[in-house]
Image (cartoon, rainbow, N blue to C red):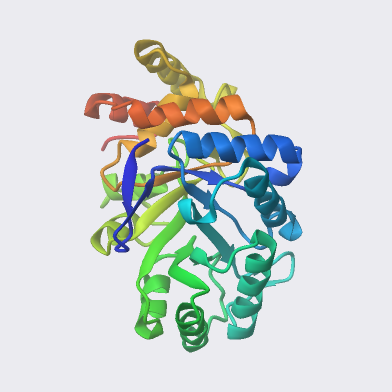
Amino acid sequence: MKRVSWGSSGQNVSAIAVGCMRINRVSLEQAAKLVDTAMEKGVNFFDHADIYGGGECETIFARARELCGRKREDMFIQSKCGIVPGRMYDFSKKHILESVDGSLKRLKTDYLDALLLHRPDALCEPEEVAEAFDHLKQSGKVRYFGVSNHTPFQIELLKKWVNQPIMANQMQFGPAHASMIRSGLEANMMSDGAVDRDGGVLDYCRLHDITIQAWSPFQYGMFEGVFLNSEKYTALNETLRKLAKKYEVSDTVITVAWILRHPANMQVLSGTMTLSRFEDICRASDIGLTREEWYEIYLAAGNILP
């Protein structure tokens, strides 16, 4: 399994991470098998959030880890907080601290390797975030910190007060959701792709040693659907199948390899709970697409080169 340097932490973690948002949709035995298989394949990174399954996903993961006999210290466990579903986003000190305590209890662990702020809070008071982070760091409850779906200036605002470095930023990214790439390549153009929707977050994260974690890599739009085998993405699927045949893998593998090929050293969050599909995704770590193949996929997805 390919390893990536995680932010500026000095930690080397698996380039593929297990996203646990759907772990409550399978049996405990299936969950344990997935966790065990991930570890066998060198995938040591597990991503959670306090809202996944209303907290149930963290509970099931802890039981699955115990069932398969894997040691907590061999894992990198990350969780996220800040979303109050259907009501608001909350970066208050009180909410952050209570969320972490809840996650620790459900995950049956004394610490999180990482805590991410899930989505930007419009009423964020960075001084409160800083107080929460200081408490969590000093108490040993959280080792590293990051964000999710944040722009560069939102991160800069936090950094003005927060003492701990921001290690990661989760962003939706894939061939059919590549605005981070498009806005750079189409700079100074009047095309739709030239619209900067994220503040140049890709280059910003590379400059500041922040690891981008790509979520929903197979989706297009905001959960509008999966582009694999979709009639809306005929050219993309034809290209993926052609390259899949060349490398003797699946189109899923080629898609993940496309993300891992980028020199930003991103992580890919795999949300599948299907064991065979997860094992397939892990194969992407061994595929090295050429520059020409990378651009071929980019163009086939409907993007342009000015």
Percent of width and height locating residue 184: 29, 50
Is there any visible trace of residue 302 in the rendered image? no
Judge left or right: residue 104 versus residue 263: right
Q: 223 or 5, which lies in front?
A: 5
Q: 60 or 155, which lies in front?
A: 60
Quarter of the picture containing the C terminus is: top left
Residue at position x 37%, y 17% in the image: 243
Q: 95 or 180, which lies in front?
A: 95
Percent of width and height locating residue 297: 36, 27
Percent of width and height locating residue 199: 37, 62
Decide: is 148 above or below 192: below
Where residue 300 sits, quadrant-wise, is: top left
Residue at position x 71%, y 56% in the image: 59
Count of numbered marks = 0
Percent of width and height locating residue 168: 40, 60
Quarter of the picture containing the N terminus is: top left
Decide: is 7 above or below 19: below
Where residue 68 sits, quadrant-wise, is: top right
Where residue 204 sits, quadrant-wise, is: bottom left
Residue at position x 36%, y 78% in the image: 159
Is there any visible trace of residue 238 in the rendered image? yes
